[in-house]
Image: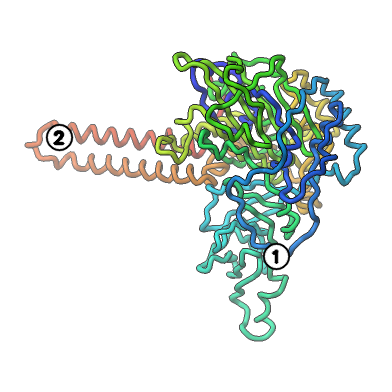
Amino acid sequence: MNSSGAAVAATKVAPRTMLSPCAVVSPIPVRAVPSITASFRTLHGCRKVLAPKSLSRRTSGAGGSCARRFRRPPTVSCALATPPDPTPLEGSAKAQGGSPDTPAKVRVSAERSMKALDDSFHSEPKSRREFVWEKNWYPVSLIEDLNPSRPTPFQLLGRDMVIWRDSQGIWRAHADRCPHRLAPLSEGRLDENGLLQCPYHGWSFRGDGRCAVIPQASDTGPESRACSSSRACVASYPAVASQGLLFVWPEEGRWTEALAVEPPRLPDVFEDEGFSSVTIQRDLYYGFDTLMENVSDPSHIEFAHHSVTGRRDRAKPLPFTITSSGPFGFEATTDTSTPTTVTSAKSTATQNHPNFSTNTADESTVEDSSIPRISSWFMAPCSFFSRIDLSPTIPVIGRQHWQLWICSFNVPMGPGKTRSIVCSARNFARLTVPGGKWWQLYPRWLEHLTSNLIYDGDMIVLQGQEKVLKRGGGGGGGGGGGGGGGGGGGVPYSKLTFTPAAADRMVLAFRNWLRRYGGDEPAWDPSLTAGSASFAPLPSTVLSRAKMLDRLGQHTEKCSSCRAALKNVRRLSAVLTGVAVVLLAAAPVVPEEMGLGAKAGLAVGVLVSLAGAAWLKYKLEPQFVHLDYVHADVE
């Protein structure tokens, strides 16, 4: 992630790219705003049914254009009790559609634009403008961080799920409760036949949710038919793998409807040889709306992440313009008086991509500018993508043409808990990006240590913000009586906060979307909003500072790279301590004829081993477990 300050410094040194939820809106430049119709076709898209031409036709004025371009294609409403053995969607199937077009910038005030959108929205049939939280694909995990040999628990929209890979290598998502006595299946295991086995009584289930084994059932009589009963099945959620992500559709058994819609796709640059990419995920103890507001706000980077990706003395105005908005998201770009086209000589994937493409231009037409520009897209329910272009001049090397994509998925797990999944790709400074090339020696876990500093920099700040919003009734936590338009105390968000700068326009656009189209909060499982459960406090209002900054539980234990690295750090620390003990014990028995040199060598060995063990134990290991983050201490 690059801040605007870091980008200005790019004329002298290549900036490091960190991953964080706020990284997705780092102020770096973009020339042309891709067509929202095309963007929507892939990132929200429907594999079989596309919006009619009449729905994507532009009309004059901000309101008509925005409302028509942000519309969800129709889907088939049909449910299957048994999944049709889906094929993982790994790979890069090109999205369909015509040549991309670029909407003109809408230079009108936010108030006029939103009023026009509102008028246009309410003039359309309800069936065309309704957003439904449950009828979407949600990325639940990076596949490389899932353990294929054991079940993994997850919560999506308050629905407890178990994720596992069956004997055919297909990832599955089921309700995390055994139909027998409601024990959590995520505490079980995969048995010798690759079936999901309950830890309580050993009932085992196939990938389609059907019960295969009931150890306590007799082989004769009525009990012999128990496995074939529909009541013995575990509820199954549609799940597909695509581009290294596992997506789940949070409606039980709706396979036909789900498979008619393609999951959100990363831009093609993530599969371009000219780009290198890195990924990270972390579970955060604050709400979906709090995280979405954070990733929509680039102006905090210079302060919240000072000396990591920002510099306090480089803060500057960020004039964003909301160019499109509607029931399924919005589009924004920096408001620049002199548009600039930046292309990459190494990549044609982005230039030709029908969903995220820019106008091409000869390199001689690219202005030499160190001022970053960005273009960002929020695609409901939880995707926030930014394309960032730079054209810095590096001493000796000359003018460069850099491109950075930071794609954030902000997954609503439950009220006050959100999973952040960030995927980043860039065509510069690639030596410091983990990868499979022989020259990419930078380990993924080391990149994650830096990225977690950015999460930590936001953590306590957002905890405090969410507490205030919760008390004031202006939202916060994405659940339990709050929302973009007010709740609890009923005070509107616009009354609780003062946001006069253009840098806050994407924040206001998201809050406006959540209030108008999202019902103020995600559609949680009914069990979370019934009875006393609706009064449960949000985690941010009760958790301690140490628990909020718990890297071990939020990230390390769920990351394959960091989990393995921590295990190796602890092993190496124990080995070095053992070496020191052995050397110390050997000192008295060193023969006199070996002289003082041998004893001095042993002493040095003891000191080096102990120093190495201490550094691993007290310096490196805490970076996987817990570090306090105090902004006043960051110089």
Report x, y in % for residue 390.
58, 22
Q: Is residue 274 above or below residue 125?
A: above
Kind of element beneath mark 1: loop
Kind of element beneath mark 2: helix
Q: Is residue 137 visible?
A: yes
Report x, y in % for residue 483.
80, 37
Mark positioned earlier in the residue sequence (2 or 1):
1
Q: Write down the residue under mark 2.
A: 598
Give the alpha-carbon distance from disc 2 to disc 1, as whole Å.
73 Å
In-image side of 418 versus 431 (left or right): right
Q: Is residue 567 above or below residue 509?
A: below
Q: Residue at x 56, y 34 (%)?
A: 425
Sort mark 1 into few (<14), some (14-19) or many (20+) by Cα contacts within 10 Å. Answer: some
Q: Residue at x 52, y 30 (%)?
A: 346
Report x, y in % for residue 633.
54, 21
Give the mark toward the camera: 2 or 1.
1
Q: Quadrant of residue 406?
A: top right
**Residue type highlighted by circle 1:** Thr
In-image side of 360 versus 112 (left or right): left
Q: Residue at x 65, y 46 (%)?
A: 139
**Residue type highlighted by circle 2:** Ala
Q: Write down the residue under mark 1.
A: 82
Q: Nearer the viewer, residue 190 or 238?
A: 238
